[in-house]
Amino acid sequence: MTKFFQKPDKVTFKIFFLSFVWVLICTALAEIFREPLESVGIPPWTLYVANVLYFIKGNPNTKEGLLEGACGGIFGLICSIGLSYMVVWMEGLGVSAIIATLIPIAIFLFLTIALHPFVPYVFNTFALCFFSVSLAVTGGANDLPSLMHAIVDLGVGPWGHFAGVILGNAIMNGGIILMIALVGKNEAKKKTD
């Protein structure tokens, strides 16, 4: 049974402390370079969400987490773009805005839940979160001009968002995996000495 408070072992403490420092450095750099990132179409939130979800996953020391995060994140963004087009198409057929929004969201949620056991790298919590957050930060499907501008019409199309997912996973989470490996190797070396 997990206690409310328990003292972590020395190795776990080192890993968490180094991870904290790394994420803090990456976050500071993302904020310092916010304008250049946004000018090439990379919204900083895509970097942060990739990192937050990596820790929520529960076991952040696996390389599979990087692949799952990148594939799921990009898939979620693609689905939010598809949602915007689907809503416009359905409204053109005379479907009310709320129904035109709810049907594609319901389809996405159903597919994510039903297909996760079969295609976990694509239908996962990363996809769900990137789908939801991209709608939330852009005004959602109810504000299609904002969504289209924020995701599609940045001059680079959705590629900046995809790059943010990949960079967030590679730099922030890849750095943490590297630290975990180095601390583990150092601890193993200490035990053999």
Image: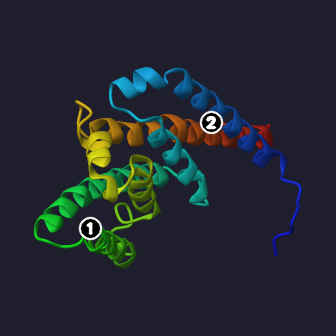
* 1 with respect to 132 (left or right): right
Residue that carries the numbered disc 2 in the rendered image: 23
Q: Nearer the viewer, mark 2 or mark 1?
A: 1
Identify which amino acid the numbered label 1 is placed on: Ala
- Asked which quadrant contains residue 24, the reply is top right
Q: Residue at x 19, y 57 (%)?
A: 85
Q: Position of residue 118 (x, y in %)?
A: 33, 74
In the picture, the disc for residue 14 is: none
Helix, strand or loop at mark 2: helix
- Asked which quadrant contains residue 93, the reply is bottom left
Q: Residue at x 38, y 33 (%)?
A: 42
Establish if 186 lies above or below 74: above
Q: Position of residue 152 (x, y in %)?
A: 24, 42
Q: Position of residue 159 (x, y in %)?
A: 27, 38
Q: Closest to the observer: 136 or 115?
A: 136
Colour mode? rainbow
Q: Position of residue 33 (x, y in %)?
A: 49, 21
Q: Please identify the residue farthest to the left as the structure is shown.
A: 93
* Count of marks placed on residues: 2
Cβ–Cβ below 8 Å for labels 2 and 1?
no
Q: Residue at x 39, y 47 (%)?
A: 138
* 87 with respect to 89 (left or right): right
Q: Residue at x 51, y 47 (%)?
A: 49
Helix, strand or loop at mark 1: helix
Dot 2 surroundings within 10 Å: few (below 14), some, or many (20 or more)? many
How far is the residue under mark 2 from the one under mark 1?
40 Å
* 68 with respect to 8 (left or right): left
Identify which amino acid the numbered label 2 is placed on: Val
Establish if 138 lies above or below 168: below
In the picture, the disc for residue 97 is: 1
For the C terminus, which image quadrant? top right
Q: Closest to the observer: 36 or 142?
A: 142
